Amino acid sequence: MTNTVLLWIIVLAAAVIVAAIALRRRTRMRSAELRRQFGPEYDRTVQELGSPARAERELAARARRVEHLRFRDLSDEDRTRFESTWNRIQAQFVDEPAAAVARANELIKEVMRARGYPADGFEQRVADLSVAHPEVIEHYRAARALSDSKRNEQINTEKLRQAVVHYRVLFSDLLQEQGEAARPPHEFHEPTPAREAGPSHVSH
């Protein structure tokens, strides 16, 4: 083996090592960025899909999809209208808690459409929201679970109240300006003694 051949082998080996180090560094940076962007949703997706690699492919795909959406800030008139609708939902809860939960669910979808989100199915809405609203997306899942878990059974008013509280957290977050820091949501107070509600029918 000549010195020239040996030199080329050393150069190529060094290039491979440098490339491997650079790739590992990019992978670590990508993982850190996805963790930062998605917060608790990153860990949830890892647990759901079984590995960080699969989770990161899924989260990156969500981010790419959302990049192509045209988002809009709400006008002051929009915010006033949506807040008024929410106030009516709270009043409706007094006599019709199941219907109020269903209306809260619909209001979330209305605000999402106004912000520029597609009105796709629940899982797609969750995926899209998780890109910019990862800290509150679990509230959406919790509200849905409370609404669906006993759909064909009696749901007590406390569980319905909890569902509305979860919807309120997401509702407050969606009403903010793009990029605005999260602020605490208004609390939901049930103004009358609890009673048992009939079967809940929540639209999806």
Image: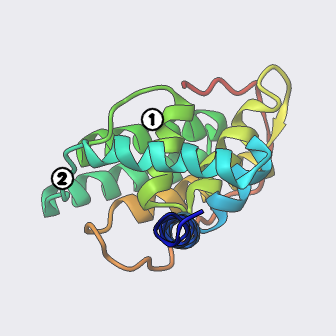
Q: Which residue is mark 2?
A: 72
Q: Secondary structure at mark 2?
A: loop
Whether tag 2 and tag 1 are in contact, CB under 8 A, the answer is no
Front residue of this view, candidates 156 and 74: 74
Q: Is residue 190 visible?
A: no
Residue 85 in the image: state x and y as whole percent. Answer: 36, 48
Q: Which residue is mark 1?
A: 106
Q: Quadrant of residue 84?
A: bottom left
Identity, as a three-letter code, of the amino acid under mark 1: Glu
Residue placed most toward the observer, 101 or 67: 67
Q: Amino acid at mark 2?
A: Arg
Q: Position of residue 52 (x, y in %)?
A: 70, 55
Where 70 sits versus 78, above or below?
A: above
Place of residue 12 in the rendered image (x, y in percent of width and height, measured from the top left): 50, 64
Q: Left or right? Give the position of 98 relative to 112.
A: right
Residue 9: quarter of image: bottom right
Q: Residues within 10 Å of mark 2 (few under 14, many from 20)?
A: some
Residue drawn at (81%, 19%), measured in percent from left and top?
A: 152
**Under tag 1, what secondary structure?**
helix
Left or right, 139 with reference to 127: right
**Tag in front: 2 or 1:** 2
Report x, y in % for residue 145.
73, 40
The residue drawn where x is 32% and y is 68% is: 176
Q: Residue at x 33, y 33 (%)?
A: 118
How many residues crowd mark 1 within 10 Å: few (<14), some (14–19), many (20+)?
some
Q: Earlier in the sequence, mark 2 or mark 1?
A: 2
How many numbered markers are drawn?
2
When the figure is inspected, residue 8 is found, relative to residue 99, above or below; the finding is below
Q: Quadrant of the N terminus?
A: bottom right
